[in-house]
Amino acid sequence: MNVIELKNVKKDYPLGATTVHALRGVDLAIKEGDFISIVGPSGSGKTTLLNIVGCIDHASEGLVKIHDEDVTTYSDRQLTDLRLHTIGFIFQTFNLIPVLTTRENVEFPLLLMKEGLSRKEIRQRAEKLIDEVGLTEQINHKPYELSGGQRQRVAIARALVTKPTIVLADEPTANLDSETGEMILKLMKELNTIEKTTFVFSTHDADILKYANGVVKIKDGLMVGDYASGANAVN
Amino acid sequence: MLVLKIAWRSLLRHKAKSFVIGVILFLGAFIMTLGDATAIGMRRGVEENIVKSFTGHVILVSNEETKDNVLFTPMMKPLKILKDYDKVRYVLSRLSYVKDFIPMTRGGLSILGGQDMSFMMTFGCNFDDFQRVFGNPIKPVEGRLLHNGDHGILLNIQGRQNQYKSQGYWLVPEGTQLVTANLSDDARKEQNLEVRSSLALEGFGEANSTNKDVPVVGVMRFKSLNTTMEEATIMDIETYRELFGYYTAQDVVQQLPPRENALLGAGEDALFGQGDIYSSSGTSANVSDLEKKIAAPQTVTRKINLDDAAYNYVSVVLKPGQSVDSAVKKLAEVMKDNDLPVKVLSWKKAAGQVASTADILQIIIYVFVILLFFVAIIIIMNTLSMNALERTEEFGMMRAVGAQKGFIQKMFLAETFSLSFVFGGAGILMGVIATWIVRAMHISSQGNRILELLFGGEVFRPTLGFTGMVVGIIGLAAVTLLAVLYPVRVARRITPLDAINRH
């Protein structure tokens, strides 16, 4: 079953008197449980593609479906709700709320949800994920007290705390040393395997592609070659 | 709770900005509280010292008066005689919302026999009644005060100095010695100071004004606002009527029917010869002429009722808690229902310039406070807008992980109102404390008329009641809300994409 489906998605940005064609007709279908990497040089349209899939940007043209629902007509409120319940985000740097501790940051999306989880359940779920990402000792630390890798791990825990079906990560290892980056990828892969969560992440680091079971190559706003999911696709 | 937690921690994280906005809110609230206290103190002072001590809340004048500014008219234009005062008195005495009232006269006098022609404002009344109705607002400085039945004038202590400058002689009450301590600087330097105890006066009446030597009975001062009232003199009602050619109480007695006069033992013909010279017209009898024609002292033993003759206006003091505007309306209806030729005015209209000066000063205070608020709003708005933009990544990230615009709005409002509560509250509290301190300092107006009106008396007595506090809190809330509206809009419009682009 496709959790993400894009048909002829185009994205144009006005830039002064000209128009930048960031995406020029992308077709893509991502299945549940995939661990997909989007690769391509800088400015190729990776981030734009992720933003559109993550419902934080609108396609200028084309169809975007999340769980078979056309989201291109959604209101801002509906899109925000979709992000809260269905999609988890891991950004490059601006990941955490600076005034909240590790635990509070992870709890944050759950507190935004209107569903009736008790305070105790929220706390238990956050603590379990924090434990899984190995930050129990830093549970009461504020972001400025954490290293870059630790912050990314908090962001992963927060992205997963609402049990989303899709997690999007925009170059999650870009600001990390290779050892920490690999550790983060391993963690993401582990959660993908255990929770069956679909992961889509962009990168231009060839070393981390080995973790992906599918690669989407983007160049000048177009997909290069055919995308196929599954371990063989990487090879 | 989540909103408040993030809001408060964000305030602490951005200490410098929070402090700048807080200080502006503190100063705004502080100045607003003190300004409000000044305005309230002034209003109460004016109420206490002008309304309750001199004008009354409502003034009744003849309906022939074309202008409302009847008490302190420029050039002391003569007032019309209030007709049917006996009926007016009857009606007023039956009204439940009227505490007390007093009939009075008001006019301008020219002072004769000095260096220059000069003028004086005077009010005529039954002085004992005046003191009773207004709670003894006039205090003697030299000589004595008037009593009902006395003839003479009371000079204002400051007005006497002005009179000396224009006339060249110093006035002391009859039967008293010169008090050198009370001499003005000019008078003290004078080697051959001329001292007199009476004034040659002539009234600016509409007809048949006359001149007369009027004895100075006393030198007085108003308990408060004396500088504002320095030109006002007070004289007994009968002397006033004589000077202005009004129909006097004495005239009334003399025009009793023959049978009643016979009972009083004073035949009209024997006393006055041609009785037709004393017509019933309110302004036709010339009292000086009358006095000359009276060969012997009156033997009339009946007490003269001074209220039976002419007055210009009636000052009405309302019972506590009565609205002046409402009383004016009700009184106008009552007078109309009783066919009385009376025009009903609020004290503000009747006092004209004095009241409007007080109003203008009050408006200036409020305009100053409002301007201050606008400046505060602009500065706070600017700082908060900058703050919102600087936090684009933070807000954008929150929106990306599922926070609705409303959450950002609540968080921003919580931050600003928390600052407003803490710093603005402290400003109001300091304003209250400053009000108490300033009040306790008894700052004097030093005889400055503008300051006297600004203070609502001779001493600065800012007052802050419960209403003032509530107005202050509402004002602070309004400023905060106005200042935060635009920044909230800015914050609400931040999208996750803005955060990514910014990054």
Image (spheres, rainbow, N blue to C red):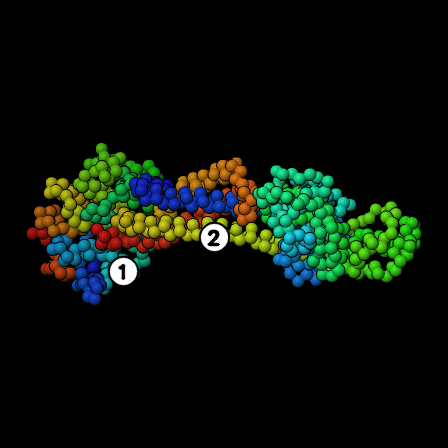
Name which residue lies at 7% across and 52% down: A235
Residue name at image x 29 percent, y 45 percent: A109
Q: Are marks 1 and 2 on the same chain?
A: no
Viewer-proximal residue among B289 and B461: B289
Q: Secondary structure at mark 2?
A: helix
Please say whether residue B91 is visible from this viewpoint.
no
How busy is the neighbourhood of tag 2: few (under 14 within 10 Å), some, or many (20 plus)? Answer: few
The label number, if any, that marks residue A72 in the structure image: 1
Residue A195, quarter of picture = top left
Along the viewing direction, whichever of A39 and B160 lies nearer the viewer: B160
Q: Looking at the picture, which amino acid does disc 1 mark?
A: Thr
Q: Position of residue B298 (x, y in %)?
A: 86, 49
The answer to whether residue B299 shows anywhere in this view is yes
Answer left or right for A207 relative to A146: left
Provide the residue designation for mark 2: B367
Q: Nearer the viewer, residue B13 or B259?
A: B259
Q: Is residue B54 left or right of residue B277?
A: left
Q: Quadrant location of the N terminus of chain B?
A: top left
Pinpoint residue B195: horizontal percent, then vertical percent. Answer: 67, 44
Q: Is disc 1 placed on a helix, strand or loop?
A: loop
Q: Chain of mark 1?
A: A
The structure residue drawn at horizontal position 77% and vertical position 59%, both measured from the top left corner, is B283
Q: Amino acid at mark 2?
A: Val
> Which circle, 1 or 2, is nearer the viewer?
2
Answer with left or right where residue B255 lies relative to residue B421.
Answer: right
Q: Subunit of mark 2?
A: B
Q: Residue B107: image x %, image y %?
A: 68, 55
The CA span between labels 1 and 2 is: 53 Å
| B364, B260: nearer the viewer | B260
Residue B256's disc number: none
Q: Position of residue A189 (x, y in %)?
A: 16, 44
Apparent side of residue B296 relative to residue B85 in the rendered image (left or right)? right
